[in-house]
């Protein structure tokens, strides 16, 4: 696994996301409340919807994104779909250093 | 000012209602003294039946307790019966010698039960059913005795019988008529009702006349053979031989039958109590005769209201007309003198839990009448509608009374129902759905009622009054509505309807099954209505401010509440509230429609569905340049470029913008399109310039955010080629102007738009349509289409605001124009680098396995 620099934190809107293209794979990098940053494969476990385009809410362990296609909620910290739905999006580790977002791919 | 002295004789519902109204109109006009024969304050006599049935308690039915009289400066002589009115000296005198002088006297002496003049009527255990004391006797009897006979199978008698059964007694109803409740029901209805009461254990002797009431010793003489049951026998044997407290033991009928009875309830009708008035030489004729201002015809200083009154030859025994009398009387006493009592059409509901009976107007029919009858004997449903001259003259229903209020309204309004006739029997929702008047959201009765519909017949409270009280005073519970409006506070038969109105107006947590009453989402206990109200009243300008003010349970809300809050903020406080893009659904953030594969569709605006070669060329060029896989003509008369990558959006917008095109908002809870036909510009049938009107409307409404999407259409003639009949606002040109239809929908279930108004000029079309849309923007809940909004609030409500009140319409229209002032083109806005950047994917190098180690080192270094 490799840490890669993505962008300055401020380039990701609060409660928003940016899409990172990693050799053709889309990774969604989310910014939730309290400047926490999460990353998931940009595909909903339901029908592959682009999670990066969903509404982000909550913070910390409770941060989640709502898929724009059919409204599934995916936990940002775990990548797991929230009950009653079942499924998981691959998650990536992130960190913030000197205002820059790093991603472990 | 010296107060006039008002003395009221009788402390019942009609009288006290009059006093309440006077206190409302002219609180300082009178010094009020009240005499009441009963030792209580004013209680709800109609609810004695539920008390008897054990469903309510005495304290539940107290309307005005003793403190109320004190608080309002009223002198109450409770438990004192007035025995004399001295009209010359203007003094009343009570049985204990108390005297009171009056300037105005109000007689509200009510009625007396009719006691059959049969032997034994004075025996212990024989009572009427009129007041708290009677009710207490019945409750006590039920605790220690077994057999009851109720004489009289009218409304009150059946309620008494039902209450006694619920208290464990064995009850027989003795009724002179051939069927029960013959004053309210026809024979088939009565038979169905009887069957359902028999199923509850009630027994009936119909066509039966009471000969005498027998005491225990008389029973002994009869030998009590085959009459007394063993349970009753033991009690009686103890009492034999005592003349003084010989309790009633049986009822003997004229045909010889003997019914065991430890309790006999006389419920064979009432007689206006005119004894005092007659003694005072006031003209009485089966009631104290009064004029339309409720003054006695003999002495204008003396008024009379309630069951003691005869008005135009009719004495009323139901509460609704009596309250109407009270209002007129108070109006006159307060010196306004504008009220006139013109008599009442009455309706009846039986208060027996689980048995639904309703009747109104002339339900018997006869010569010159048509009858529509539905009779499902096995299903226990009977409905009969009586029509005369294309009007509904009366209705009687057993088993299913849901449409009672509607029928009653049709009867009172004397509305021509010939158009409805085929569907009339199937109720309001069905009948009106065939006129395009209903939605498909599991509509409630309340949502369909116009604001003028009377909901509480007892207190004369219309739906509009209830709705405005709920809105203005922020009422959330049935009790509050009762307190503020009096609706459902008398007989209680409209309680369900009032609850529905409450729920459909702003909510009410007690009724979680209603969608409008539900909290917005799990983040809050507040309903959409409450949140809207708070945003407006507290002038909240940002989502965090709303969450703070309303104690949101989650720190940042969720995907359900945030878009709703954002809409409420920007629609309530345009140009002031903060518009949070992250609280909008992706389409409104990306200004394009997300597709199933994550690409977007781009729809440039084509005003009124019109385009030109320059635009078409630009669209064609863009489609090629950005490799758009699908180009499609939409239902809203424009061109959709499907399959655009998000990264390309700002650039394709820029290209289209150079040809003069702007965002079509095909992605928003906002104005979508104004569809037009070619109109009088080209069409040989066209009466109006439909394209021109459409373009004007679309330009006016550009950038309008709304609770849900909004679609318009303008057709140049009634052929409606632009499909105005299924649009949120549909304009249909006619030779003399335009007809405006609203709340149509071509979606999940087609809703035909409803006629709002006819206007003659283009400016009027803009103002009327704009005012309607602004009302919708201000009052609808987030994600409520116009058809559901109008279904919820009623078209009458909309018409009153938008059509009937020009000043209100103007205000709405101006608020809309203010909100839409300088509405930006979001596509142009997103040419700014800071915004465009959000659409770009961030590339990072895919790291090959063999390079991983080096890269990791370089990062850590």
Image: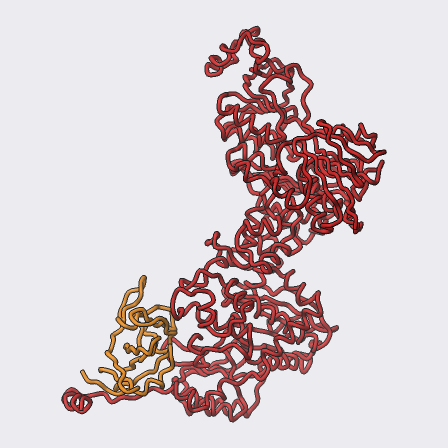
Name the foreground residue: B793 vs B549: B549
Q: Count the labels in the image.
A: 0
Q: In the figure, residue B820 lies in which quadrant?
A: bottom right
- Chain whose colour in the figure is orange: A
Where is residue B336? Give x, y as percent: 79, 51
Side of B731 where B836 appears, left or right: left
Q: Is residue B778 visible?
A: yes
Name the foreground residue: B786 vs B210: B210
The colour scheme is by chain
Residue drawn at (48%, 78%) of the image: B579
Side of B315 where B351 appears, left or right: left
Residue drawn at (46%, 58%) of the image: B518
Point out the image quarter for the C terminus of chain A: bottom left
- Is residue B221 positioned above or below B92 on the image? above
- Chain whose colour in the figure is red: B
Where is residue B221? Give x, y as percent: 57, 6
Q: In the figure, residue B315 lies in which quadrant?
A: top right
Where is residue B318? Give x, y as percent: 67, 38
Residue drawn at (48%, 27%) of the image: B168
Q: Is residue B371 visible?
A: no
- Is residue A64 positioned above or below B34 on the image? below
Name the foreground residue: B607 vs B542: B542
Point out the image quarter for the N terminus of chain A: bottom left
Residue drawn at (59%, 55%) of the image: B448
Name the foreground residue: B629 vs B330: B330
Where is residue A45? Give x, y as percent: 29, 71
């Amino acid at each position: 696994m490799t840490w890669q620099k993505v962008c300055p934190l401020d380039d990701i809107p609060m409660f928003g996301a940016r899409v990172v293209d990693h050799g053709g794979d889309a990774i969604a990098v989310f910014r939730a409340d309290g400047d926490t940053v999460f990353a998931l494969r940009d595909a909903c476990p339901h029908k592959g919807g682009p999670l990066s385009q969903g509404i982000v809410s909550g913070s910390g362990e409770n941060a989640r994104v709502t898929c724009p296609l059919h409204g599934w909620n995916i936990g940002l910290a775990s990548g797991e779909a929230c009950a009653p739905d079942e499924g998981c999006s691959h998650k990536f580790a992130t960190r913030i250093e000197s205002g820059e977002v790093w991603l472990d791919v | 000012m010296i107060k006039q002295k008002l003395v009221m004789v009788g402390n019942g519902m009609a009288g006290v209602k009059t006093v309440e109204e006077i206190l409302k109109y002219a609180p300082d006009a009178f010094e009020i003294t009240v005499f009441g024969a009963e030792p209580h304050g004013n209680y709800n006599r109609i609810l004695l039946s539920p008390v008897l049935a054990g469903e309510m308690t005495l304290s539940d039915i107290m309307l005005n307790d003793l403190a109320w009289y004190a608080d309002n400066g009223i002198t109450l002589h409770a438990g004192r019966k007035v025995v004399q009115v001295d009209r010359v000296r203007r003094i009343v005198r009570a049985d204990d010698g108390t005297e009171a002088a009056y300037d105005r006297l109000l007689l509200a002496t009510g009625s007396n039960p009719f006691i059959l003049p049969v032997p034994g009527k004075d025996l212990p255990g024989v009572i009427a059913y009129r007041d708290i004391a009677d009710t207490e006797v019945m409750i006590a009897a039920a605790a220690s005795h077994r057999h009851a006979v109720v004489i009289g199978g009218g409304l009150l008698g059946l309620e008494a019988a039902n209450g006694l059964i619920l208290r464990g007694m064995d009850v027989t109803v003795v009724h002179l008529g051939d069927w029960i409740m013959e004053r309210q029901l026809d024979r088939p209805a009565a038979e169905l009702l009887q069957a359902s009461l028999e199923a509850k254990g009630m027994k009936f002797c119909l066509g039966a006349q009471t000969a005498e009431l027998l005491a225990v010793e008389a029973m002994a003489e009869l030998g009590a053979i085959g009459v007394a049951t063993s349970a009753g026998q033991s009690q009686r044997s103890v009492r034999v031989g005592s003349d003084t407290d010989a309790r009633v033991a049986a009822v003997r009928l004229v045909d010889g039958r003997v019914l065991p009875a430890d309790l006999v309830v006389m419920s064979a009708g009432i007689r206006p109590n005119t004894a005092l008035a007659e003694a005072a030489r006031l003209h009485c004729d089966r009631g104290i005769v009064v004029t339309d201002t409720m003054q006695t015809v003999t002495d204008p200083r003396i008024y009379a209201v309630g069951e003691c009154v005869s008005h135009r030859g009719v004495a009323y025994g139901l509460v609704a007309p009596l309250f109407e009398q009270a209002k007129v009387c108070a109006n006159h006493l307060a010196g306004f003198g504008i009220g006139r009592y013109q008599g009442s059409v009455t309706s009846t509901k039986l208060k027996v839990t689980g048995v639904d009976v309703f009747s109104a107007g002339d339900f018997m029919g006869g010569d010159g009448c048509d009858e529509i009858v539905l009779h499902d004997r096995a299903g226990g449903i009977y409905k009969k509608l009586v029509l005369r001259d294309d009007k509904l003259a009366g209705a009687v229903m057993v088993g299913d009374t849901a449409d009672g209020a509607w029928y009653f309204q049709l009867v009172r309004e004397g509305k021509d129902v010939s158009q409805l006739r085929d569907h009339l029997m199937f109720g309001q929702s069905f009948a009106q759905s065939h006129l395009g008047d209903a939605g498909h959201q599991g509509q409630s009765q309340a949502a369909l009622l116009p604001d003028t519909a009377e909901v509480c017949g007892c207190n004369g409270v219309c739906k509009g009054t209830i709705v405005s009280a709920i809105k203005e005073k922020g009422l959330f519970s049935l009790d509050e509505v009762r307190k503020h409006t009096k609706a459902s506070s008398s007989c209680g038969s409209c309680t369900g309807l009032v609850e529905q109105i409450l729920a459909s107006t702003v909510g009410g947590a007690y009724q979680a099954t209603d969608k409008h009453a539900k909290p917005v989402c799990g983040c809050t206990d507040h309903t959409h209505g409450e949140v809207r109200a708070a945003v407006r009243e507290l002038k909240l300008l940002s989502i965090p401010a709303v969450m703070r003010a309303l104690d949101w349970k989650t720190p940042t809300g969720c995907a359900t509440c945030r878009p709703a809050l954002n809409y409420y903020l920007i629609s309530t406080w345009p140009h002031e509230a903060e518009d949070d893009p992250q609280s909008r659904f992706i389409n409104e953030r990306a200004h394009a429609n997300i597709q199933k594969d994550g690409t977007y569709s781009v729809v440039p605006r084509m005003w009124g569905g019109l385009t030109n070669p320059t635009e078409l060329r630009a669209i064609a060029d863009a489609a090629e340049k950005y490799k758009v896989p699908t180009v499609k003509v939409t239902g809203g008369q424009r061109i959709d470029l499907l399959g655009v990558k998000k990264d390309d959006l700002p650039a394709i917008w820029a290209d289209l913008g150079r040809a003069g095109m702007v965002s079509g908002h095909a992605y928003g809870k906002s104005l979508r399109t104004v569809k037009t036909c070619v109109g009088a510009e080209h069409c040989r049938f066209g009466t109006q310039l439909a394209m021109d009107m459409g373009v004007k409307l679309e330009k006016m409404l550009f950038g309008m955010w709304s609770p849900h999407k909004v679609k318009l259409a303008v057709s140049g003639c009634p052929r409606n080629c632009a499909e105005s009949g299924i649009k949120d606002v549909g304009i249909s040109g006619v030779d003399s102007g335009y007809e405006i239809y609203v709340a149509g929908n071509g979606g999940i279930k087609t809703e035909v738009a409803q006629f709002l108004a006819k206007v003659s000029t283009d400016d009027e079309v803009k103002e009327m349509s704009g005012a309607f849309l602004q009302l919708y923007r201000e009052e609808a809940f987030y994600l409520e289409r116009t058809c559901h909004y109008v279904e919820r609030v009623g078209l009458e409500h909309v018409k009153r605001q938008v059509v009937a009140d020009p000043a209100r319409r103007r205000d709405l229209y101006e608020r809309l124009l203010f909100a839409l002032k300088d509405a930006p083109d979001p596509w142009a806005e997103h040419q700014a680098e800071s915004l465009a950047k959000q659409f770009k994917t961030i590339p990072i190098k895919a790291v090959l396995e063999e390079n991983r180690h080096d890269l990791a080192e370089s990062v850590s270094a």
